[in-house]
Amino acid sequence: MSGRQRIDEHATGTDRTKPIDRRLFGITEGVRRYLGVTIALGLVSAIVVIGGAAILAGLVNRIFLDGVAPTDLIGGLAILGSIYVARAFLEWGRSVAAHRSAADVKRTLRDQVMRAVLLQTTQGRVAGSGDLAVTATTGLDSLDAYFSRYLPQLVLGALIPLLAIAWIVTVDPLTAVIILFTVPLIPVFMILIGNYADRATQSRWRTMRKLGDGLVETLRGLMTLQVYGAGEGRLDRVRRLSDEYRKQTMATLRIAFLSAFVLELVATISTAVVAVAVGLRVVSGSLDFEPAFAILILAPEVYAPLRKAGSEFHAAMDGMEAARSAFDVIEASPPVEERTTIRPDPTPGTPFIEFASVTYQYPTSETEETAVVLDNVDLRVERGERLAVVGPSGAGKSTLIRLILGFGTPTVGSFRVAGVPIDRLDLKAWRARIGWVRQDPFLIAGTVLDNVRLGSPDADRAGVVNALEVVGAIDLIPRIDETIGERGIGLSHGQRRMVTLARALLRDPELLLLDEPTAGIDSETQLVIARSFDRIAEGRTVLTVAHQRVLVDVADRVVVIDHGRIVTPVEGGLR
């Protein structure tokens, strides 16, 4: 079963319609502080709202019924103005806290997602890159709406009705009962519509992730698609997903508009019921004007936060869905176990690298069907040895290197480094002792110096120049500050290979892994690398996967692998 399937099953097995995901509030200390600030400010806001309504009702009563001149009420008007200014500052403070908290959550989630992806890469369980890109960028950016608009209204929707009812019951118990029975109608409709809207949002989110994956895959294989004339088929798929995403987005918007209409209608009818009940009792003389007017001012404020929370729910759903997807990726990571480092003084006779009856297989599809890549491999590599591994494409040579790097563990058998099983090894410390040259040179947009320094970011300029000199890239030394494009645009394929070889040497590795280092480069550059091989391999253990004889001839020992099995170990190279 794939990692994506496990994630989707986890998603459908949990309640994703709750208005609050508690995991968001345990992710950083800042979020818990923000929640406390939001509750505190919400409580103060509720008191300000009730106090403002009572003061305003008293001022109106004294001016229009008692005949007091407005000039005699300067103090009361000043207090009322101060209340509204204070309310504005409370809103501002809450907004600042919300945005800072959202930024903290987004930064932490992105960091944890990247760490989880790096960890999952070793097991081949990562979701599609387009999926991850959508989740970690646009998706998590939607958390701003969750923290700045939805959550504050949810807090106010809980606090203002409770405090308002507590105050109203002291002046008019009947109105308090009406509010007590009508306020829950809004959450009920929010839940009913929210469940439907959440399903629509999840469907839209899945389509957006598929669209992201499809677009990334198409861009990656653009050249291949052009050569084989298969570009139109991929474009049709992108168009189809885009159209499906458009339709689902419009359907979600229709639900949002319907929700806003229903909640507005419920709030309006509830306010009208309160107004009618209060008005009839004022006319009959059973209720004084001042408390009645205060209740009429307060009634819309009681229903407004919940109504706004319902409206903002749809704006916050994308952020919540992205956060849940991020948590799915994070929680799918294997537990971090305590690892050990290689002993500096291993037991005498212990090989540096040892494969003992290793079989390795990986899933070939979304089913449980597997393919064996390595089959009962026994191999020992001593310190300082130069080993060449040869064989046809797909024989399992690169898989040997993947296992040595820790990107996977044997399905059967054991792989040890200096006597330490790979699954107990501190991989970070182990990889720091390895220099790796990939089949496909990985270069970034920047200078030649920047690309070589990827191997050791703290290396000085002289170290970079020396590494280039050792691998024989003399022509690149004058161009060390020249800017090259992504993937090495501006350099020949052989020069790109030289840069990656110099990068591997710059970290002064104990083990050098060369995966087809001369593949696809001209014969002259192959000879340059071969002539430099003694200096490159000096004081190191070297394992070379090669097709070309030029590097096989400089090996101390050659191992032939075919269909995942070592078929003919050859001592002393092919010289």
Image (spheres, grey):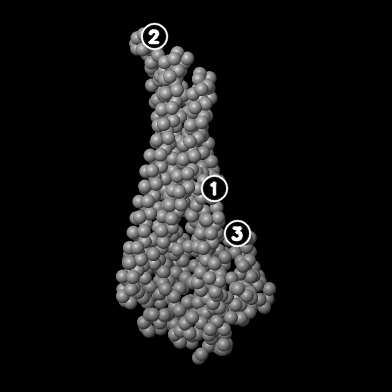
**Residue corresponding to mark 1:** 23
- Of callouts 1 and 3, the N-terminal one: 1
Label 2: state its secondary structure: loop
In 3D space, how far apart are the residues under numbered discs 1 and 2 (Cα atoms)?
A: 56 Å
Q: Which three-letter amino acid code belongs to the residue tagged 3?
A: Pro
- Of callouts 1 and 2, the N-terminal one: 1
Q: Nearer the viewer, mark 1 or mark 3?
A: 1
Could you tell whether 148 is left or right of 572 in the image? left
- The answer to whether any part of residue 344 appears in the image is no
Q: Nearer the viewer, residue 488 or 294?
A: 294
Q: Quadrant of residue 377?
A: bottom right
What residue is drawn where x is 37% and y is 12%?
A: 63
Q: Quadrant of residue 91?
A: top left
Label 1: state its secondary structure: helix
Q: Return the x and y of residue 102 as percentages of the image width and height.
A: 45, 44
**Residue corresponding to mark 2:** 66
Q: Which three-letter amino acid code belongs to the residue tagged 1?
A: Arg
Q: Which three-letter amino acid code belongs to the residue tagged 2?
A: Asp
**Residue corresponding to mark 3:** 335
Q: Return the x and y of residue 243 as percentages of the image width and height.
A: 34, 59
Q: Nearer the viewer, mark 2 or mark 3?
A: 2
